[in-house]
Image (tube, helix red, strand yellow):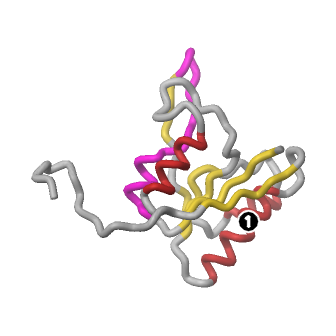
Amino acid sequence: MSNDSNVIATPHRPPGELRIYLGAAPGVGKTFAMLGEAHRRLARGQDVVAAVVETHGRAQTAELLAGIEQVPRVAISYRGTVQYELDVDAVLARRPDLVLVDELAHTNTPGSRNRKRYEDVQELLAAGITVVSTVNI
């Protein structure tokens, strides 16, 4: 154990599990299915949060997001605009059983913690947090 005051002692957690909903194109129901799974897990008593969920303006998808705690995204300034990305530190601090992270293949805004979202997810998994995500193939 380190004497470094920035280190927080926590019991070791095994790596989290990764579940990916695959789809052939946008709009086929990946995010909808991911949110359905989140509600089932909440009903079983699991601690579930949403870190990145893209509704793309779909009312039914937005309705499914209701009732799921959302971790705010981090704002990244880039070329005169502000983009919002997954806040890895906030999720790690919250330490849920499961986190929803849409669009696994996303390229993060320059200046983000990691270049790609899958790298953010790798950090969450290593911390023992299970991740449910989506990707188009």
**Residue at 42 percent of width and 63 percent of height:** 95
Amino acid carrying mark 1 in the image: Leu
Q: Residue at x 48, y 25 (%)?
A: 111
Marks counted in the figure total 1
The one of 51 and 117 positioned closer to us in this rendering: 117
Q: Quadrant of the N terminus?
A: bottom left
Q: Quadrant of the C terminus?
A: top right
- Residue 18: image location, x then y, percent: 62, 60
Q: Is residue 89 magenta?
A: yes
List x then y, in percent, for residue 54.
Answer: 71, 48
Quadrant in which residue 41 is drawn = bottom right
Against 104, residue 133 (above or below) is below
**Residues in magenta?**
78-95
Image x and y of residue 129, in percent: 49, 62
Crowd rating for badge 1 (residues with CA inside 10 Å; few <14, some 14–19, many 20+)? some
For disc 1, the marked residue is: 64
Q: Is residue 94 above or below residue 134?
A: below
Seen from this angle, which residue lies furthest top? 79
Q: Residue shown at 51%/54% (left/top)?
A: 71
Q: Is residue 106 left or right of residue 32?
A: left
